[in-house]
Amino acid sequence: MTGMVRGLFGLALAATALLAMVVPGAAQEAPSGTVEITSITIAPGFGFNWGDGILTLPDGSKHKFSLENPKVVAVGISTVKATGSVYNLKRVQDLEGCYRAVEAGIAIGAGVSGMMMKNEHGVVIHLHATQMGINFNVGIGGMNIKLKSHLF
């Protein structure tokens, strides 16, 4: 069991290194905003992640959104809290869309994961998450984001 966990952890670390290559220029720009996400993942080999988030813009305005994220290579059940930076956001409506992502993570009790993703409008999101539960995921996937409302 320990060997398997070490192997999965090594694989997750290698995949996390790939995250740095997905969108090399975005980290050098000033963020267009920040996001906070809370979600749940259920995955018996393949899985599904769904949740809600809040986009905060530099002017302080906040916008609710929902997300759905099918997972191809994932095992476990976990809750995830993520924060991140948004880049290349010209209009709030551009947050919506289908994002292509590279992600990696492992959680046994508690764990961490990372994701970089980009949608068809050129919006890039870098996420860092903490997970509670038992979960392993790695690979290239996608996430759908839809705006819900303007908070204030």
Image (cartoon, rainbow, N blue to C red):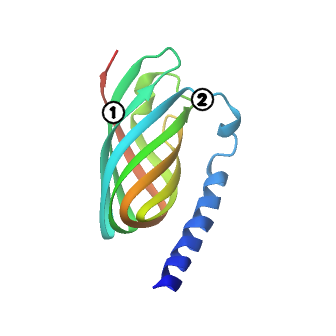
Q: Which residue is at the front of the view, 142 or 85?
A: 85
**Residue 37 falls left or right of residue 115:** left
Disc 2 from disc 1: Cα separation: 18 Å
The mark found on residue 31 in the picture is 2
Residue at 60 percent across and 55 percent down: it is 19
Instruction: Tell me where residue 31 sits by quadrant.
Output: top right
Q: Which residue is mark 1?
A: 65
Q: Residues within 10 Å of mark 2 (few under 14, many from 20)?
A: some
Which quadrant of the figure contains the C terminus? top left
Compared across the picture, whether 80 is left or right of 121 comes to left
Q: Residue furthest front?
A: 109
Q: Left or right of 69: which side holds 127? A: right
Q: Position of residue 44 (x, y in %)?
A: 29, 71
Residue at 50 percent of width and 14 percent of height: 59
29 left or right of 10 in image: right
| Element under disc 2 | loop
